Amino acid sequence: PSNKFSKVSHLKPMLSLSNAFDKNDMEDFLKKVNNFLNIKNENLEFFSEPKIDGISATLIYENGVLKKGLSRGDGIIGEDILENLKTISSIPKKIIGRDLPKILEIRCEIYIGKKDFLNLKNKFANPRNAAGGSLRQKKSEDTAKIPLKYFAYGFGAVEPMIFKTQSDFFEKITNWNFITNPLIKIVSNLDEIEKQHTLLDEERSKLDYDIDGIVYKVNDFNLQKRLGNTSNSPGWA
Ligand code: IVH
C-alpha cells in the first residue's frame, strides 16, 4: 500500500454516523427527529439499510461519465484513487440512463466478500483491511487482481437535484446499474425497526460480507435537509 495519492477536497464532507446501541437509544432518536420536525407523525418513514463494514469511497460523474474517485481521507480531504476504483468491473464507468444529473456523486462502501477473503487470509488480518490495502496499491494492475465489490448507499453533490427520497434514489441508481444492497426496508415505528433488526441479525452470518450495524435514514430529503448535520454526523440518520 502507498501513501502517495494526491489529495483532493471533497465537494461535500463525508460524515460519520451517530450510534444507537439499544432500544432506548433508538427511541430517543425517533423522539428527537419527531420533536425537531414538530410532528407527532407515527408514520414518518425511515429507510433501513445494512451498514457495510468496508472502506468508503466516492465516485464523481460528469454528464454520466466517471471522472473522479476518492477515498474518504479525513472526510474533508480525500485521495485520488480513481484508477484503482476503475478496476472494479461492477462500478459503472459511463451511466446509461435518461435524465441524469450533470454532476452525480455516488457514495459507496468497497468490500471483499468473505469467501474471496479466504484466498487472501495470509496477507491481511480481515476483509476490511484487505479492501483498504487493495485500494491503496501503487499500481492499479495490482488492485485489479483483488476481487473488490461495492454497495452504493448515498450521494454527495448532485446537480440538479432530482431525488426526492432515499427509496427514490435507490431505485434510480439501481436502474443505472449501480449495485445497491437488497436488504432494505421502509420502517415507520419502533416495532418495525426492532423487527428489521431481528431479521438482519438472523441473516447476518449467512451474508458474504460483514455488516457492523443498520443505518436508519429519514426517507424524505426535504425533511433530511431540515434536520441538517452536526459537525460530523447527520441528524437524519
Ligand atoms: S450513510 C452522512 N449508509 O459508514 C453519512 N453509510 O459511519 C451517511 N457505511 O463512512 C452515511 N454502509 O462509508 C451510510 N448503508 C450505509 C452505509 C454507510 C456503510 C459507512 C460509510 C461511512 C460510515 C459512517
Image: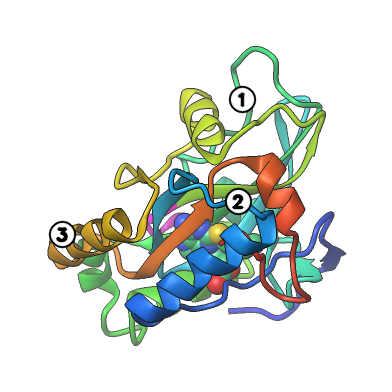
Residue under the image location 42 percent in, 42 percent down: 180
Specify the quarter for ligand 1. bottom right
Q: Which residues are magenta?
A: 143-150
Quadrant of the drawing holding the N terminus: bottom right
Label 1 sits on residue: 95
Quadrant of the drawing holding the C terminus: bottom right
- The amino acid on which the numbered mark 3 sits, given as a three-letter code, is Glu
18 magenta-colored: no
Disc 3 to disc 1, C-alpha distance: 32 Å
Mark 2 and mark 1 residues within 8 Å of each other at the beta carbon? no
* Local SS, label 3: helix
Position of 211 relative to 99 (above/below): below
Taking depth in this image into account, of 203 and 36 the one nearest to the observer is: 36
In the picture, the disc for residue 78 is: none
Label 2 sits on residue: 39
Position of 25 relative to 192 (above/below): below
- The amino acid on which the numbered mark 2 sits, given as a three-letter code, is Ile
Of the image marks 2 and 1, the number of the one nearer the N terminus? 2
Of the image marks 2 and 3, the number of the one nearer the N terminus? 2
